[in-house]
Image (cartoon, rainbow, N blue to C red):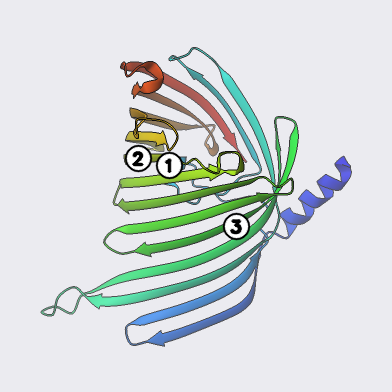
Amino acid sequence: MKKFIILIIINFAIAAKSTTIYKEIKQKNNSIEKTLISVKKDFISKINFFIPDYLNINEEKSFVNYSAKYSTLNHKPSSSLTLHLRFPSFRILKKTLRKTQKNKSTSSQRTSSTTFEYKIRPYVRLKKGKIKVFLSNSFKIKKTAAFNFTFLEKINLYLDGYWEEESEFSINRNKNTATLNINTNKNEKDNLFYTLGFYHYHIFYKKLYVLGYELSGEKDKAPFIYSHNLFISYRHTLFHTKRIYYEIKPFILYSKGYDFKLKEGVDFSFHYKF
């Protein structure tokens, strides 16, 4: 069985490319419309490791994810190891580029784009000794102009009948991002979990600095805003690679879980992604 899995891994690693099934390009006045249908056979995902999860609206799952964490709030260390086997994905992409004049008195132009993307991909996941097989369906709308707007709807369907649904809305300009995340699952299908975050990030000499504020809650719990979290995150890579990094995050928490009393703490974490 192990040899069979290794052979599958080697096969996908060798065949890490994209095959185009259909391609069409149309030009209308000041716009170019591109439609692409393809099968993407990449085995290992490409992740921007400098950008944290809450700033990357469509982060793909890498093959190996290991993290070790410790928080001064509860003094409890934790660690997790997750493996994902990524199978080829089927993707439909439609992208429109438009050029418009900034004003009538000048000839300078502004370029904007709108992208519609649907992707379906099977996964095999190993976490906490349990193997799960699921089909990930995602639909994304992305508009790039003065402000960058992204909407992502993702549904994961498992072989055992379990499902997860996640919706994300993101607005970004320069180094400022606002993201609303709403998710639910089969066990909580009548409930909604939501987080609204505002972030300012800066990358300086391969170090990531993020000033963030998050408020969150869930439909079945009162009040509507259950917790507030103000933090500064510092992330630095190790051994001259983006795949290994540590993160230090001092924060101030104001939550009903702590009777709305201010709590200060620091989260320390170590991550390896491949």
* Quarter of image, res 131: top right
For label 1, the residue is: 54
Image coords of residue 205 (percent x, y) = 37, 37
Above or below, comparing residue 122 to residue 80 in the picture: below
Q: Using the numbered discs, state the Cα–Cα distance from disc 3 to disc 1 in whole angstroms.
A: 20 Å
Q: Which residue in the structure is indicated by mark 2?
A: 197
Q: Left or right of 247: which side holds 186?
A: right
Name the N-terminal-most of marks 2 and 1.
1
Mark carried by residue 87: none
Is residue 190 visible in the rendered image? The answer is yes
Give the amino acid type for the residue marked by disc 1 in the picture: Tyr
Vertical side of 114 occupied by 15: above or below: above
Residue at 55% of width from left, 64% of height from top? 118
Q: Residues within 10 Å of mark 1 (few under 14, many from 20)?
A: some
Image location (x, y in percent) of residue 55: 41, 45
Q: CA distance from mark 3 to mark 2?
A: 24 Å
Is label 3 or label 1 in front? 3
Is residue 50 visible to us here? no
Task: Quickly name the residue at label 3.
Answer: 137
Q: Tag 3, which secondary structure?
A: strand
Residue 73 image offset from top left, x and y in percent: 43, 15
Left or right position of 201 against 124 = left
Instruction: Please report whichever mark, 3 or 1, sits nearer to the chain's N-terminal start.
Output: 1
Q: Tags 3 and 2 in contact by the CB under 8 Å rule?
A: no
Q: Earlier in the sequence, mark 3 or mark 2?
A: 3
Question: Which residue type carries mark 2?
Answer: Gly
Q: Is residue 3 above or below residue 255?
A: below
19 or 266: nearer the viewer: 266
Label 1: which secondary element: helix
Amino acid at circle 3: Asn
| Mark 2 in CB contact with mark 1 (< 8 angstroms) | yes
